[in-house]
Image (tube, grey):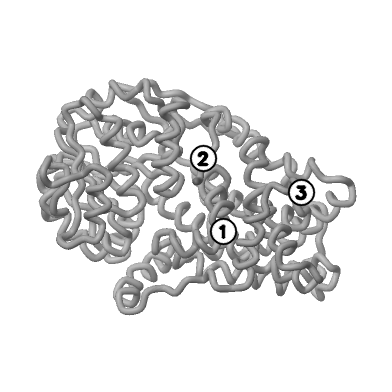
Amino acid sequence: MADFSFSSRVFDVETIELAGTTEAIVRGGRHLFPKLPEALAGVRQIGVLGWGPQGRAQACNLRDSLAGAPIRVKVGLRPGSPSRADAETAGFRVSDGTLGDWLDVAAESDLVLCLVADAAQAAQCAEIFARLRLGATLGLSHGFLLGHLTNVGAELPPGVDVIAVCPKGMGDSVRRLYLQGAEVNGAGINASFAVVQDRDGHATDRALAWSIAIGSPYTFQTTLDNEYRSDLVGERAILLGAVHGIVESLYQRCRIAGDSPERAFERSCETVTGVLAPAISRAGLRSVPEQFSTADRAEFDTAYAASYRSFRELIVEIYDEVDSGNELRSVVLSGARLARSPLTPISGSPMWAAGRSVRARRGAAELAADPFTAGIFLAAMTAQIDVLVERGHPWSEIVNESVIEAVDSLLPYMHARDVAYMVDNCSITARLGARKWGPRFAAVLDQIVYPAAAGGSDDPSRTPDAQPVKAFLDHPVHEVLARLARLRPPVDIFVG
């Protein structure tokens, strides 16, 4: 595992031990906002290109955190952008110099945050690079662009610093928790950071200031290569794609077994988003099986043991497809296709109609976790953790991409809106990945896991045994999650 130590001239850097490894982190909080101008020395204007979920959230958070400082935050949009009215509503206007043409903003800013959609970055990066002035800093919130440039044999622009700050949650969470942080100091979304090019030795402090200013409770270091690999794998697996495939398959299984639509939805989707997510957030992964009676615990163990190996094989395949560049190419290729024919929603299946009915009657009685669903979901989550460990990612990144982002950002939104809503309203990169790989998780369940759990597999190697469950109970992730939980502000995201 790579060395993830760093130093800062401005912020206090802590060292934490995680499962036998050492990482450096910086804690956030509003008490650090007065230090931001020092860390951003030489930055007179921060240009935020794009008004997607991350662009909107980060521009607003940066503006609010730098209020009173001699640093302007300016949003750059394409001519005729349909987002202009929303940006103006949020307080960015041409008349006061906080809104302008995106390429002009890129040319005049000292720190340029390129937060346009991934496919648009790939298509227009050369145009953006050409406008950056010598000595400026280019900021990214995703390693996608670096992966694309590697695919096509191109490079990041010389003569500029390049940094990344990557929130471990969607843009709406970044903004909502920042606003909640006005009452609970430091409430926000954790972020990783990376320094790719550093010409003057100050790039780390700029990245840390950016992360603190958008509200990150703690910031950890990674590489941009690691970031886009773990991020794309997570979107296609436990953060979105796996959730979609798992709940759809379990819902159909429950319906075939005779459950009503509402009961089937409760045993599948509600268990994951409404019961398991808050339990894991508050008490960790191991708390889930500990809650079950003897009979339910046996059902959990059977589901976990029957599914872990197959899920791990699938996530290894996902990782290899990301690592090879195939997943990035598919997103880039989608640009022209989606311009002609946008993706159709997936929310039309009967399952999501049942979800509306279930949400309308919530609160009548406390819902207990379905043990079979719990075993399936935790097996998928642990499988992703193990693949990322095997590929050398730092523990902070592994746990944030596999657990914290799921239970503290995405699953609460899925609980409030439903999984289909999330798949239909996330970034194109995540949306394409979820629609591609979600059905693969469902197929694994239908074709391999359910027969094995029922004792009907013809392959003796697929017969569930106790080893995967024992490995789960002894897993170092429990120690890591407990350590990182102490860095979490005592506030749950409010999804109105």
Frontmost residue, 183 versus 438 = 183
Instruction: State which quadrant residue 481 falls in.
Output: top right
Disc 1 target residue: 418
Residues under numbered marks 2 and 3 in contact, where contact means CB atoms less than 8 Å apart? no
The crowding category of the residue bearing disc 2, from other C-alpha atoms within 10 Å (few below 14, some 14 to 19, many at least 20), is some
**Real-space Cα distance between discs 1 and 3?**
19 Å
Determine whether, in the image, residue 261 is placed left or right of residue 88: right
For badge 3, the amino acid type reads Ala
Instruction: State which quadrant residue 66 falls in.
Output: top left
Frontmost residue, 350 versus 387 = 350
Residue 459 visible (yes or no):
yes
**Residue depicted at x 29% and y 33%:** 64
Mark 2 lies on a secondary structure that is: loop
Mark 1 lies on a secondary structure that is: loop
Disc 3 target residue: 368
Residue 3 visible (yes or no):
no
Instruction: State which quadrant residue 459 falls in.
Output: bottom right
Q: Position of residue 332 (x, y in %)?
A: 33, 68
**Residue depicted at x 61% and y 39%:** 281
Residues under numbered marks 1 and 3 in contact, where contact means CB atoms less than 8 Å apart? no
Question: Along the polypeptide, which appears first: circle 2 or circle 3?
Answer: 3
Disc 2 target residue: 493
Q: Is residue 9 above or below residue 119?
A: above
**Residue depicted at x 71% and y 72%:** 446
Q: Residue furthest right?
A: 294
Q: Is residue 32 above or below residue 213?
A: above
Q: Position of residue 228 (x, y in %)?
A: 41, 53
Determine whether, in the image, residue 420 is placed left or right of residue 196: right
Determine whether, in the image, residue 203 is placed left or right of residue 327: left
For badge 1, the amino acid type reads Asp
